[in-house]
Amino acid sequence: MANSVVVMNGSNGSHHEDPVRLSRKQRAVVSYIEHNPKFAAFATAGELGSRVNVHPSTVVRLAQLLGYDGFPEFQAAIRHTYLCSLDAVSLNPPHTPGRFADIVTSSLDQDMRNLATTRASLDSKTMQQVARLIQAAPVSLAIGGGSHGGLALIFSHLCRFMGLPVDAEIRGGISLAARLSQIEPGHVVIGSSAWWVLNDTREGLAYAREKGATTIAIADSRASPLAQVADHVLITRSECVCFNQSLVGHLAIVNAIVAEIATNGSQDIQQRMLQSTAIAERLGAVWQHTGTEFEDAGGDAPAGA
């Protein structure tokens, strides 16, 4: 973790460097976090307090004093900073054939925890607002790199199927620059990240915001650099049992936005979906079942088999 604890300023995830007056016990908690970020990133408020010999309420009040809603949001910022400091090898546990089955189960269990945390932290009104913004925008752009590029493609595809003008730009660099040059006020730009925030995605959202577009971030912490340049922040959890970032929470958010638009959007959404389906059928895009030789024979094997 960095040499200082991130101090929040407002609900949009921005931070500042203004000094915060801390008590002796609170300073002790901060010092422990800075020297033991791995423990603090995953411990409860009670466990953290016991390590410093203070009451859990001291830990909670510290989080609130630093601008967080409570300890869970504070811990998400600690975890984000800690994981960002690790390389892929450090994140990846030792794998042996004997424990592979345990790793598989642990991975599924972690994904379920990620989804549970995402469900508990999301505000449905914010999700509905984001859905309305995307539906109303003349142009929307989903950006992301690496695994998050896949998320951008999925979101663009689902929105396009509903007839919405949502593009995906996942190449970064000069390709992203060319696409961002077309951003105007009233457009929507959505980006996603976890603890490794790609500079292209962060700066892409920052530029779009400067140009008057509405920016939306799907991130794992309000302390994320991506959250700091977003008008609307959707928080999920992204821990995995190995080096990669789990995207089940990010994808769940995308699915929820799409479901909101498809179910409660304008009446012409359904008509556009029917049109997309009809065109796909005309193109023969979807495999159609036809009886095989085995099935046509009533289950008997072909002659000579």
Image (spheres, grey):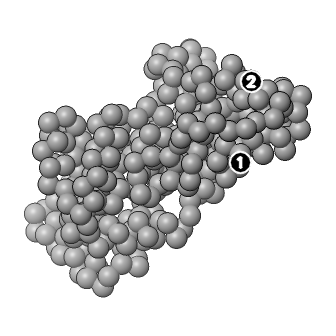
Q: Mark 2 belongs to which amino acid?
A: Tyr
Q: Position of residue 275 (x, y in %)?
A: 18, 75
Q: Secondary structure at mark 2?
A: helix
Using the image as rendered, state which of residue 169 and residue 289 is in the foreground: 169
Say which of 70 and 268 sits in front: 70
Q: Residues within 10 Å of mark 1 (few under 14, many from 20)?
A: some
- Residue 2, compared with residue 111, is above or below; it is above
Amino acid under label 1?
Gln
Residue lying at 50% horizontally and 46% vertically, measured from the top left: 14
Q: Position of residue 104 (x, y in %)?
A: 56, 32
Where is mark 2, residue-wise? 32
Q: Residue at x 35, y 37 (%)?
A: 147
Q: Quadrant of residue 2?
A: top right
Q: Report the residue marked by disc 1.
A: 64
Q: Secondary structure at mark 1?
A: helix
Marking on residue 188? none
Q: Quick one: quadrant of the N terminus?
A: top right
